[in-house]
């Protein structure tokens, strides 16, 4: 039976503590009650039964979300995302499997919270592969097993890498990311007038529109000037310059190649090339 499960959760006006107190007042269900409600929802589409299943497990979401407070994200947001996972679990829960909803739901709750943390904890993604996600969510707890607040030693890094099945370099990189801090690209409205934000010194003036246009015009003039300068050379000098510096494949001819072509020494070709380049510089010099 396909349906969309959209249930209200208790909203306690005033504070997060009031919400938590309301959630903990929801009665816990016995196994028989849980099975009966799950069957009513899946067999009959009874949303009231689904609501009771969700309400009775809100305390589980709160407990799981509390374990992720170390990432600096609002507890209320973590709970909200966990509630989404709980509702997904209720929708997919099958009591015939012989598993209690609490065991089934915890995986869905954690999955939603993990996704929320990865999307919002840093502007730059810190974990994209499955191995990196495992490292991201386990590195902090594994580090707590070592004494001291200093960075990981080489041996500690290797041990954590072995446990999580990643390279030591990945552990070191993730530790640096976790220890970093976000920095606003633009300044705050409260900053002093003489304060500088990263946007002020990270901007690349080379891509400023007028400079781009000027650069293209300069390149065009240089290209035209190059053709004019080449035309002023004698045939042999022009052939040597084009073969040495202006070949289409980017691989210029060698002095010995041209020496064989003109039946002179490689040193003679070098002298002709040097004089031709000097003449061209004079032709290209601004008046």
Image (tube, rainbow, N blue to C red):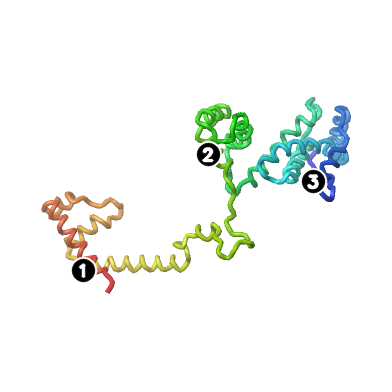
Residue 232: mark: 1
**Residue 34 at x, y = what percent?**
85, 31
Instruction: Label 3: state its secondary structure.
Output: helix
Q: Measuring 17% from the left and 53% from the top, which residue is drawn there?
A: 258
Q: Is 214 placed above or below 41 here? A: below
List the single residue furthest toward the left: 264
The reply to whether discs 1 and 2 touch (Cβ–Cβ < 8 Å) is no
Mark positioned earlier in the residue sequence (3 or 2): 3
Instruction: Measure how far apart labels 3 and 2 are at the Cα level.
Output: 35 Å
Residue 16: mark: 3
Instruction: Label 1: state its secondary structure.
Output: loop
**Residue 89 at x, y = what percent?**
76, 36
Looking at the picture, tell me which residue is in the foreground, 245 or 197.
197
Q: Residues within 10 Å of mark 2 (few under 14, many from 20)?
A: few
Q: Measuring 24% from the left and 58% from the top, which residue is drawn there?
A: 242
The quadrant of the image that shows the C terminus is bottom left
Instruction: Measure how far apart labels 1 and 3 are at the Cα level.
Output: 83 Å
Which of label 1 and label 3 is nearer to you?
3
Q: Is 280 placed above or below 101 here? A: below
- 77 vs 56, left or right, is left
For label 2, the residue is 173
Instruction: Measure how far apart labels 1 and 2 are at the Cα level.
Output: 59 Å
The reply to whether discs 1 and 3 touch (Cβ–Cβ < 8 Å) is no
Mark positioned earlier in the residue sequence (1 or 3): 3
């Amino acid at each position: 039976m396909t349906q969309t499960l959209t249930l209200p959760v208790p909203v306690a006006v005033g504070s997060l503590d009031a919400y938590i107190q309301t959630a903990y007042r929801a009665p816990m269900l016995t196994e028989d009650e849980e099975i009966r409600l799950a069957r009513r929802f899946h067999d009959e589409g009874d949303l009231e039964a689904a609501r009771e299943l969700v309400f009775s497990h809100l305390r589980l979401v709160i407990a799981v979300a509390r374990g992720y407070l170390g990432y600096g994200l609002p507890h209320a947001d973590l709970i909200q995302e966990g509630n989404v996972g709980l509702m997904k679990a209720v929708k997919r829960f099958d009591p015939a499997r012989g598993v209690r909803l609490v065991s089934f739901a915890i995986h869905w709750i954690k999955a939603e919270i993990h996704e929320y943390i990865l999307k919002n904890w840093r502007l730059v993604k810190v974990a994209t592969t499955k191995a990196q996600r495992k490292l991201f969510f386990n590195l902090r707890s594994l580090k707590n097993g070592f004494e001291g607040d200093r960075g990981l030693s080489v041996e500690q890094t290797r041990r954590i890498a072995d446990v999580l099945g990643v390279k030591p370099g990945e552990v070191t990189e993730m530790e640096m990311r976790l220890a970093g801090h976000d920095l606003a690209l633009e300044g705050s409205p409260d900053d002093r007038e003489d304060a500088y934000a990263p946007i002020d010194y990270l901007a690349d003036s080379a891509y400023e529109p007028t400079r781009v246009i000027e650069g293209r015009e300069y390149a065009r003039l240089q290209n035209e000037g190059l053709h004019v300068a080449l035309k002023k050379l004698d045939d042999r000098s022009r052939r040597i310059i084009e073969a040495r510096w202006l070949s289409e494949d980017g691989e210029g001819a060698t002095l010995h190649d041209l020496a064989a072509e003109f039946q002179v020494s490689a040193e003679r070709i070098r002298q002709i090339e040097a004089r031709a380049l000097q003449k061209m510089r004079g032709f290209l010099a601004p008046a």
